[in-house]
Image (tube, rainbow, N blue to C red):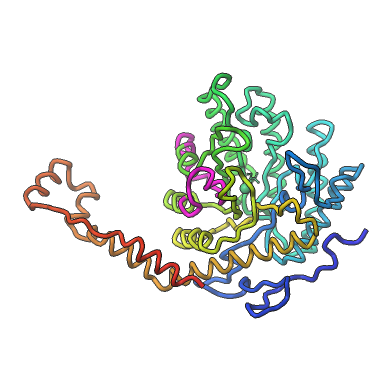
């Protein structure tokens, strides 16, 4: 069988003038900016799930994408063929990382034992493939949402057997992530939520979820996994009410269960929008709470209220997001994972490559813009100026515990304090941003 992407050459940085359809024009991995090469700032990852495990089917129509490994009578043979295609894609795109769910890489077996056996066999297969590849694992995760057994949740399922099944699956998936040198382990609560309170004990379910996460963290320390544990917030879809609604909700949950120093967030652009936030809001919230872990970069469709998982292509939105990443101290052990799928009509193998190349360039260009904004310092100076009053000793005294409410009141009245409104200069700063974008 000919390699799925085999005829395509490896894609390189060729600069903005390149006329080649498949070339990086903005993403020069070795370009040093803010003291580090771009590849280290961005840590791009290809998602096995969307790129290899999707076939273009939707609720109204049959598969449109040619994914031959999905129709093999021997499912393990299909899984190896899929892995071969995956590593071809990694070679063509020449990006440093990939991500997977257990079910993306290995088929479900007749029972849990057989599923775990299939999974472990494919982990060994991937380990071998990684020896001949530059691709590293950004994160592993378990799919605890597709099979009907998870329809009422995984850790929050009313049935303790599903809790046990999920815990066993996550244990093995963490082992595999460690074995493959993964930098992070992700938990997206696909069906951790509810449809109606008429059949749901929400308080109990949240406590079960807290215990589950504590088990995961205890196990991480037991096996010496030095990656980050990440929760991926999403407000709805598939369930009407997801427990990991957004960053602030997740932080409250972590605090309640004593895990705020142990678990961070994997933020996805369109999940932020579904929660009524911007991506940069979620990033800034996570950074301010010290739980910014990693990013899933995609976009939704502003005309649709569901998760379309499209490849990102809005330069200003991505610049604002990556500006907050830089202000927040960078992405650390996380990365930028393309949790995005091509459209149903994009049926050529090359369409998947174009999607990634465009998205990589968009993110690189956005990062360069964000870095230039940081280096120019105008926005930072405007913010510093806005808060400059707090540099005065009498202002500091209100925050450092040396003044009581009564004392503040006495001083304020004695000094005849009479604040004058000052402009927030929003339009001036928006114009500055637009003027600076390149
Ligand atoms: C679902 C989603 C998942 C997670 C991993 O919306 O984003 O792909 O990233 O389970
Ligand atoms: Co995601």
Residue found farthest to the bottom = 17
Does the magenta-highlighted stretch encompass residue 412? Answer: no
- Residue drawn at point x = 66 percent, y = 33 percent: 167
Image x and y of residue 50, in percent: 71, 50
| The quarter of the displayed image where residue 430 is located | bottom left
Q: Which contiguous range is marked in magenta?
A: 253-281
Question: Magenta span has 275?
Answer: yes
Drawn side of residue 401 relative to residue 105, left or right: left
Is residue 185 visible to the viewer in this orientation of the structure? no
Residue 398: where, in percent of width, then height? 20, 49
Q: Is residue 32 in view?
A: yes
- Please give the name of the residue rendered at 23% of the width and 59% of the height, measured from the top-left corner: 422
Does residue 183 sit above or below 112 in this rendering? below
The residue drawn where x is 54% and y is 71% is 36
Residue 291 in the figure: left or right of residue 46? left
Please identify the residue farthest to the top as the structure is shown.
198
Quarter of the picture holding the N terminus: bottom right
Q: Residue at x 76, y 53 (%)?
A: 345
Q: In this view, does 214 lie to the left or right of 422?
A: right
Q: Where is residue 12 in the image (x, y as percent from the top left)?
A: 71, 73
**Splitting the image into 4 quarters, where does residue 348 fall?**
bottom right
Q: Along the horizontal axis of the image, is 108 left or right of 266?
A: right
Task: Name the foreground residue: 221 vs 393.
Answer: 393
Residue lying at the far left in this picture: please name it: 414
Q: How many numbered marks are there?
A: 0
Q: Height in image: 197 above or below 61?
A: above
Q: Residue 53: where, in percent of width, then height?
A: 77, 48
Q: Is residue 320 above or below residue 277?
A: below
């Amino acid at each position: 069988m000919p390699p799925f992407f085999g005829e395509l050459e490896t894609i390189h940085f060729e600069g903005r003038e390149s006329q080649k359809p498949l070339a990086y024009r903005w993403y020069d991995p070795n370009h040093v900016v803010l003291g580090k090469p771009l590849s280290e700032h961005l840590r791009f990852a290809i998602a096995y799930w969307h790129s290899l495990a999707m076939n273009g089917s939707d609720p109204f129509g049959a598969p449109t994408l040619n994914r031959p490994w999905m129709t093999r009578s021997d499912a393990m043979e299909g899984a190896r063929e899929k892995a071969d295609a995956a590593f071809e894609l990694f070679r063509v795109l020449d990006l440093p990382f990939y991500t997977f769910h257990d079910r993306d890489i290995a088929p479900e077996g007749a029972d849990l034992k057989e599923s775990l056996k299939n999974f472990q066999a494919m982990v060994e297969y991937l380990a071998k493939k990684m020896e001949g590849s530059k691709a590293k694992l950004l994160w592993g995760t378990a799919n605890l949402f597709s099979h009907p057994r998870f329809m009422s949740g995984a850790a929050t399922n009313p049935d303790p057997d599903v809790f046990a099944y999920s815990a066993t699956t996550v244990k093995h998936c963490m082992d595999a992530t460690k074995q493959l040198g993964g930098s992070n382990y992700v938990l997206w609560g696909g069906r951790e939520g509810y449809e109606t309170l008429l059949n749901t004990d929400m308080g109990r379910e949240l406590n079960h979820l807290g215990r589950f996460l504590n088990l995961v963290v205890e196990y991480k320390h037991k096996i010496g996994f030095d990656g980050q544990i990440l929760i991926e917030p999403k407000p709805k879809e598939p369930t009407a009410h997801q427990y990991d609604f957004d960053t602030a909700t997740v932080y409250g949950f972590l605090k309640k269960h004593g895990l705020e120093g142990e678990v961070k967030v994997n933020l996805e652009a369109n999940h932020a929008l579904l929660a009524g936030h911007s991506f940069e809001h979620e990033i800034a919230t996570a950074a301010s709470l010290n739980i910014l872990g990693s990013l899933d970069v995609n976009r939704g469709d502003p005309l649709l209220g569901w998760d379309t998982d499209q490849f990102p292509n809005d330069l200003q939105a991505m610049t604002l997001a990556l500006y907050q990443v830089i202000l927040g101290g960078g992405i650390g052990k996380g990365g930028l994972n393309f949790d995005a799928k091509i459209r149903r009509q994009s049926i050529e193998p090359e369409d998947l490559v174009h999607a990634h190349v465009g998205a990589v360039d968009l993110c690189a260009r956005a990062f360069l813009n964000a870095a230039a904004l940081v280096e120019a310092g105008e926005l930072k100076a405007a913010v510093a100026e806005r808060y400059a009053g707090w540099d005065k000793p009498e202002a500091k005294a209100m925050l450092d515990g040396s003044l009581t409410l009564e004392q503040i009141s006495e001083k304020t009245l004695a000094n005849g304090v009479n604040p004058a409104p000052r402009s927030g200069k929003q339009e001036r700063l928006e114009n500055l941003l637009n003027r600076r974008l390149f």
